[in-house]
Image (spheres, rainbow, N blue to C red):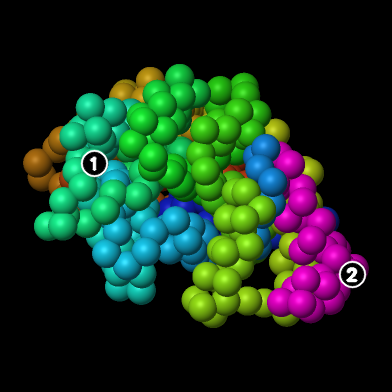
Amino acid sequence: MHTIDLRSDTVTLPTPAMRQAMAQADLGDDVFGEDPATNELEQKVAGLLGKEASLLVPSGTMGNLAAVLTHCGRGDEAILGNQSHTFLYEAGGIAALGGVHPHALPNAQDGTLDPTAIESAIRSDNVHFPRTRLICLENTQNQCGGRVLRPDYMTRIRQLADAHQLKIHLDGARLFNAAVALGLSAGTLAAHADSVSICLSKGLAAPVGSVLCGTKAFIQEARRTRKILGGGMRQCGIIAACGMVALNEMIERLAQDHALAQALAKGMAGIPGLSIEPDHVETNIVFFEVTHESISASQIADELRRQGIQILALGPRRLRAVTHLGIEIQDITVTLDALRKIMA
């Protein structure tokens, strides 16, 4: 049976071009700074994001953790969203390993944090308080449905951060999705962030790896942080080579994923018992709610799985589907037909 896997864009598989690039990569020892493929990738990503330097890390979680630990010391505070990946899905690493105090604010429906709430959360200089050092944002915002943070919002947060001598870290795991959705460069969206991480292994379809970007001084310190976290790698050019193919060949095709997500959302909007706002689906992530009281989200996911369709139930009434390389329009049609039958 053909499986339609809509659980996440992390399930993508490397393309034949990526596998060939892995086999042919020019390799060296990256801890010594001698892996040519890794050096090339880091220069490429830094250029695309308009930063001075970058650092290949094994995962987005390590990229975000290394960024926060580089910006903050033990007992410092980072302001972030209560729906952010760092707050929800990174095992509390900034607190457990860095001693950094997370100050979580509610994410708005569009993924933003209210600037007034951010400013109110910034601590005054008082021995009773942790020192506020960092604002963490996420673009696209996963748990808010892949929503996109726009340049005018980033400008406003930059002005706020500068007024209080704070740094900004941008979790840009799906930043290229945001760039494609807005028709802007990733560098434009990252311009106001002091550091930004991007993921190679989601919509870009590389098998592993993320890249953290910032100033040369920041990346030099983050390289030390990466080593502490066990992220120093040797002949990691086999990873970097896939990343280069991803950056050269996979960014523009993200628009196809967005179109498929829209098709899925619009189809769901016509199914009784399901609730979704297609206008809120800006990229490749589709969240929807079950309003029919006689069936739960987990029951829907289980029945779809029996039919060879995988999605995630993320609550009693909430489900998520993500489009990506390997999903085609016929898969969307099959999924919608299955949902109509289940909800009938």
- The residue where tag 1 is placed is 122
Near mark 1 (Cα within 10 A), the count class, few <14, some 14-19 or many ≥20, is many
Q: Residue at x 38, y 20 (%)?
A: 279
- Horizontal side of 30 relative to 318 (left or right) equals right
In x, y percent, where is residue 315?
A: 20, 52
Residue 41 visible in the shown view? yes
The quadrant of the rendering that contains the N terminus is bottom right
Q: Find out whether the residues at labels 1 and 2 contact each other: C-beta distance under 8 Å.
A: no
Q: Nearer the viewer, residue 178 or 333?
A: 178
Q: Quadrant of the C terminus?
A: top left
Q: Which amino acid type is shown beneath numbered disc 2?
A: Asp
The answer for how far apart the CA atoms under marks 1 and 2 are is 47 Å
Mark linked to residue 26: 2
Q: In the visual, does 4 lie left or right of 83?
A: right
- Count neighbours of disc 2 (C-alpha within 10 A) and say few if under 14, some if 14 to 19, many if 20 or more: some
Which residues, given as a range, are shown in magenta?
20-48
Marks 1 and 2: which is nearer the front? 1
